[in-house]
């Protein structure tokens, strides 16, 4: 596939109807927003569409004319079939954001139900939200190896270390791929890493809760650890590009940056020096600092995605938390005259 020059899409799509499962979620809301801006008619699913936690969706630009919400549970095939009826594409975002081993079956069986319901309803193309949790958790990957779409987490290691979320995302992705082949469905899979940035919904999501703990000084130390980060709007664009680009398919690793936690915390402190952000590592016994690993996001860049700098995601995430009342607004102290 030829690389595309920039993040702008090509011609607008015909006004297709597509469905987004878990529409009210942190990522799902931005996927819905991106689709509406692109001119799609969108049906969003939630287990309780009338719950006030989904109200923000109806405020999105274009929602009045082009968005409808419907009730569906990924464990209820009948509800999925009616949600997908008449849809050209399905974005399967919904999944329990939990490390509870009991919820592994919901992620995996739910994904199987989605694929089968999509095939039953004549859907052409499915985009699945997997996670880098399905790719990066491998203790035997060389520190010099590049994390890319060929990588898979080590299931046995994840199980032994109680990383049930990683197990669930791996098994769900494998299930989707097998079902797509069996049912003749086109499938593209987006693997976002820790997703940062402003929230469309009111409630705090996992990553913003994490940033809030550092900002408020409730997290007194940071771990000697490395992680990967990406902007939520890039994740949404990746889903739509993977859906629209002719010939797109397979896995797309969605990683913008890999940082040591000291760098992330330093960035927060630099942007918001007026908050009591810790500068203390919890691992001060002389252990070497964990090294950021290499990664490739070339497949998404080839689709035309331009990644947002992490500073911008962090800055806008904090401003959003201030505006929604999750973080008190503290004025920056003027610098003392020297
Ligand atoms: N956030 C991240 O950093 C990150 C990174 C990589 C991948 N992901 C993946 O991205 C997706 C969305 O994550 P998020 O952080 O945006 O999620 P979130 O805000 O925590 O919301 C989870 C969503 O899953 C839905 N859900 C859970 N169980 C369900 C069920 N049985 N039936 C129907 N819906 C169900 C919830 O629907 P209700 O509203 O009905 O409860 C909700 O919309 C997930 O697949 C997650 O694994 C997230």
Image (cartoon, rainbow, N blue to C red):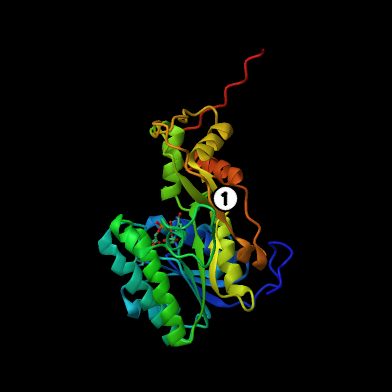
Q: Residue furthest right?
A: 5
- Tell me residue 157's x, y (percent): 34, 59
- Tell me residue 193's x, y (percent): 49, 56
- 245 to the left or right of 158: right
Q: Quadrant of the C terminus?
A: top right
Identify the residue position indicated by label 1 in the image: 257
| Residue shown at the point (63%, 63%) measured from the top left | 298
104 and 122: which one is in front?
104
Q: Residue furthest left?
A: 102
| Residue shown at the point (50%, 37%) measured from the top left | 262
| Residue shown at the point (42%, 87%) measured from the top left | 120
Q: Is residue 7 above or below residue 15?
A: above
Q: Is residue 216 above or below residue 257?
A: above
The local secondary structure at tag 1 comes to strand
| Residue shown at the point (52%, 71%) measured from the top left | 42
Q: Residue furthest top?
A: 338
Q: Is residue 26 visible?
A: yes
- Tell me residue 282's x, y (percent): 39, 34
In terms of image quadrants, where is residue 335?
top right
Q: Quadrant of the N terminus?
A: bottom right
Q: How many marks?
A: 1
222 and 271: which one is in front?
222
- Tell me residue 168's x, y (percent): 35, 65
In terms of image quadrants, where is residue 332?
top right
Q: Quadrant of ligand 1?
A: bottom left
Q: Is residue 49 visible?
A: no
- 132 to the left or right of 316: left
Q: Residues within 10 Å of mark 1 (few under 14, many from 20)?
A: many
């Amino acid at each position: 596939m030829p690389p595309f020059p920039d993040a702008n899409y090509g011609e607008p799509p015909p006004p297709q109807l597509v469905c987004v499962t878990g529409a009210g979620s942190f990522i799902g809301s931005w996927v819905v927003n991106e689709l509406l801006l692109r001119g799609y008619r969108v049906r969003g699913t939630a287990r309780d569409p009338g719950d006030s936690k989904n109200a923000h969706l109806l405020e999105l630009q274009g929602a009045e004319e082009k968005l409808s919400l419907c009730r569906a549970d990924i464990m209820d095939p009948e509800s999925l079939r009616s949600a997908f009826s008449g849809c050209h594409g399905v974005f399967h975002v919904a999944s329990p954001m939990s490390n509870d081993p009991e919820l592994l079956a919901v992620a995996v069986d739910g994904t199987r139900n989605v694929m089968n319901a999509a095939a039953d309803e004549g859907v052409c193309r499915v985009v699945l939200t997997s996670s880098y949790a399905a790719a990066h958790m491998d203790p035997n990957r060389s520190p010099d190896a590049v994390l890319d779409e060929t990588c898979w987490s080590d299931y046995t290691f994840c199980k032994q270390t109680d990383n049930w979320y990683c197990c669930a995302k791996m098994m769900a992705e494998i299930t989707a791929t097998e079902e797509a082949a069996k049912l003749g469905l086109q499938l593209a899979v987006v693997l976002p890493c820790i997703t940062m940035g402003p929230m469309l919904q009111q409630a705090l999501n996992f990553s913003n809760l994490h940033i809030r703990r550092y900002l408020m000084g409730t997290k007194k130390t940071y771990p000697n650890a490395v992680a990967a980060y990406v902007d939520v709007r890039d994740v949404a664009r990746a889903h739509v590009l993977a859906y629209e680009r002719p010939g797109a398919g397979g896995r797309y690793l969605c990683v913008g940056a890999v940082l040591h936690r000291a760098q992330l915390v330093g960035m927060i402190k630099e942007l918001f020096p007026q908050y009591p952000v810790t500068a203390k590592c919890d691992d001060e016994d002389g252990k070497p600092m964990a090294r950021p690993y290499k990664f490739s996001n070339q497949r998404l860049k080839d689709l035309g995605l331009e990644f947002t700098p992490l500073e911008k995601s962090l800055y806008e995430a904090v401003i959003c938390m201030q505006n929604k009342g999750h973080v008190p607004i503290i004025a920056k102290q003027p610098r003392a005259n020297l």
